[in-house]
Image (spheres, grey):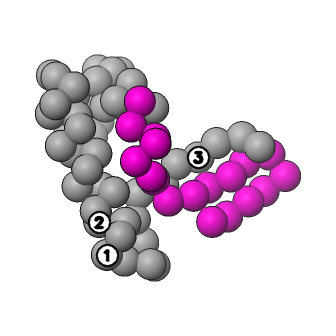
Amino acid sequence: MLTTPRLLLRLLTASDFDHFYALDTDPEVMKFIRAPSTSREESLERFQKLVHYNSLYTDRGAYMVTTH
């Protein structure tokens, strides 16, 4: 976890799915990454892979940035 006076950077957790889904299905957000997910199930599958990846490694992973 990394904190600044305004932001918190932490590993993605299962409770972050709704935020991930909103970004993962937004064409403007995904324009330069890949095609956006077309269903909640497709997005959930991608999200679960990221959370699983986070459980395997402690020095890298998918992060969530929030404000304090």
User: What residue is pinned by disc 2?
Assistant: 53
Tell me which label, 3 or 1, sits earlier in the chain: 1
Q: What stretch is highlighted in magenta?
A: 1-18
For the image shown, how many numbered marks are present on the structure?
A: 3
Which kind of residue does numbered mark 3 sit on?
Val
Image coordinates of residue 10 in percent, x first then y, are 57, 58
In the depicted structure, whether residue 68 falls above or below residue 13: above
Image coordinates of residue 19 in percent, x first then y, are 45, 32
User: What residue is pinned by disc 1?
Assistant: 56
For the residue pair 4 and 32, the one nearer the viewer reads as: 4
User: What residue is pinned by disc 3?
Assistant: 65
Is residue 41 shown left or right of residue 7?
A: left
Q: Which of marks 3 and 1 is in front?
A: 1
For the residue pair 25 and 12, the one nearer the viewer reads as: 12
In the depicted structure, whether residue 11 falls above or below residue 34: below
Image coordinates of residue 66 in percent, x first then y, are 64, 42
Q: Mark 1 touching mark 2, by CB under 8 A?
A: yes
In the depicted structure, whether residue 28 falls above or below residue 46: above
Label 2 SS: helix
Crowdedness near tag 2: few (<14), some (14–19) or many (≥20) residues, C-alpha within 10 Å: some
Question: Does residue 40 appear anywhere in the picture?
Answer: yes
Among the 4 quarters of the image, the one containing residue 59: bottom left
Label 3 SS: strand
Residue drawn at x 41%, y 57% as measured from the top left: 62
Among the 4 quarters of the image, the one containing residue 39: top left
Say which quadrant the C terminus sits in: top right
Residue drawn at x 73%, y 59% as measured from the top left: 3
Crowdedness near tag 1: few (<14), some (14–19) or many (≥20) residues, C-alpha within 10 Å: few
Say which quadrant the N terminus sits in: bottom right
